[in-house]
Amino acid sequence: MGRENTVKYKSFEFAKRVVKLYKYLCDEKKEFILSKQLLRSGTSIGANITEADVAYRVNPKKATRFRQWATKRCTRYPKRLCMVW
């Protein structure tokens, strides 16, 4: 087995738990609106990680430049919401 991607694995496991919670909320508690938003939010994490991984594989130089730009921006504007690398 190859090198395991921990972030992908954890996001997939989290998504599975979110789907179970969604089913529980719909079936047992009859909550449809909030549970649908929970489902969209909880499963989009893995999609975002996959999208970033694909973008990096397609053009790693551009992805690295973006990461450097974002890091520089975070140090310049520390009070704004910044991603932690």
Image (spheres, helix red, strand yellow):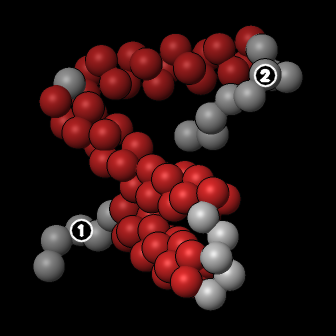
Helix, strand or loop at label 1? It is loop
Q: Nearer the viewer, residue 33 or 75?
A: 33
In this orientation, does residue 54 appear?
yes
Q: Position of residue 66 (x, y in %)?
A: 43, 19
Residue at the spot x=34%, y=38% of the render? 52
**In the picture, which quadrant includes the C terminus?**
top right
Q: Quadrant of residue 73?
A: top right
- State the image coordinates of residue 56 (x, y, percent, origin top left): 27, 34
Secondary-structure class at tag 2: loop
Q: Is residue 34 above or below residue 17?
A: above
Q: Earlier in the sequence, mark 2 or mark 1?
A: 1
Q: Is residue 16 above or below residue 50?
A: below
Find residue 76 and report its image quarter.
Answer: top right
Disc 1 residue crowd, few under 14, some 14–19, many 20+, Cα 10 Å: few
Disc 1 marks which amino acid? Answer: Arg
**Residue 26 has which mark?**
none
Q: Which residue is mark 2?
A: 80
Q: Is residue 60 left or right of residue 37?
A: left
Closer to the camera in the image, 27 or 15? 27
Q: Which residue is mark 1?
A: 3
Kindly identify the amino acid type of the residue bearing the numbered disc 2: Arg
Viewer-nearest of labels 2 and 1?
A: 2
Q: Is residue 7 at all visible to an observer of this figure?
A: no
Q: Residue at x 50, y 79 (%)?
A: 23
Residue at point 63% right, 40% down? 84
Q: How far across and down, in percent of the image, does residue 50 sit?
A: 31, 48
> Residue 34's spot in the image, x, y percent?
66, 59
